[in-house]
Image (cartoon, helix red, strand yellow):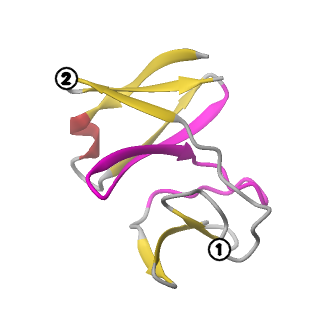
């Protein structure tokens, strides 16, 4: 596992989220309930983007919606709300002063 800087808190100012490629990982950084989170920004269904729009509420869960086929993923767990076998990869996040780091296997 290695630690990489992915951005800073100022990167979250516009939409409370941003994504960056590190190695071959497209990682979405976002705030949920005042905590930083990191998940894969690639839908496991067909590879569409998960981020780039606001987190919405669905069935009392906060969700991201894939822009290609409208699959919804729980922003807390990464699980697809309709197909439980589909899940977004989660990454450990660390904040050091204003710098945001992720851990990648």
Quarter holding the N terminus is top right
Residue at left offset 21%, top offset 37%:
10
Quarter holding the C terminus is top right
Looking at this view, name the residue that lies furthest to the top: 2
Residue at left offset 28%, top offset 39%:
11
Identify residue for label 1: 81
The residue range painted magenta reads: 24-52
87 relative position to 51: left or right: right
Estimate the x, y position of residue 46 in percent, counting from the top left. Answer: 78, 58
Estimate the x, y position of residue 15 in percent, counting from the top left. Answer: 30, 56
* Element under disc 1: loop
**Vertical position of residue 94 compared to residue 63: above or below:** above
**Vertical position of residue 82 compared to residue 97: above or below:** below
Residue at left offset 76%, top offset 72%:
83
Give the mark, 1 or 2, whose residue is nearer the N terminus.
1
Residue at left offset 49%, top offset 16%:
3
Q: Is residue 9 magenta?
A: no
Q: Is residue 34 magenta?
A: yes
31 relative position to 10: left or right: right
Estimate the x, y position of residue 36 in percent, counting from the top left. Answer: 35, 44
- Based on the displayed image, in which of its 4 quarters is residue 8 positioned? top left
Q: Which mark is residue 31?
A: none
11 relative position to 81: left or right: left
Task: Check disc 1: other Cα within 10 Å, few if <14, some if 14-19, many if 20+.
Answer: some
**Decide: marks 1, 2 in contact (CB < 8 A)?**
no
Task: Check disc 2: other Cα within 10 Å, few if <14, some if 14-19, many if 20+.
Answer: few
57 relative position to 45: left or right: left
* Element under disc 2: loop
Q: What's the CA distance linking mark 1 and mark 2?
A: 34 Å
**Vertical position of residue 59 compared to residue 12: above or below:** below
Identify residue for label 2: 97
């Amino acid at each position: 596992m290695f630690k990489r800087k992915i951005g800073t808190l100022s990167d979250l100012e516009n939409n409370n989220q941003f994504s960056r490629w590190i190695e071959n990982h497209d990682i979405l950084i976002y705030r949920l309930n005042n905590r930083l989170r990191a998940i894969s920004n690639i839908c496991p269904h067909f590879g569409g983007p998960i981020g780039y729009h606001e987190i919405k509420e669905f069935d009392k869960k906060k969700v991201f919606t894939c822009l290609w086929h409208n699959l919804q993923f729980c922003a807390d767990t990464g699980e697809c709300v309709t197909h439980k076998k589909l899940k977004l990869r989660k990454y450990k996040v660390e904040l050091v002063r204003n710098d945001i780091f992720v851990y990648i296997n």
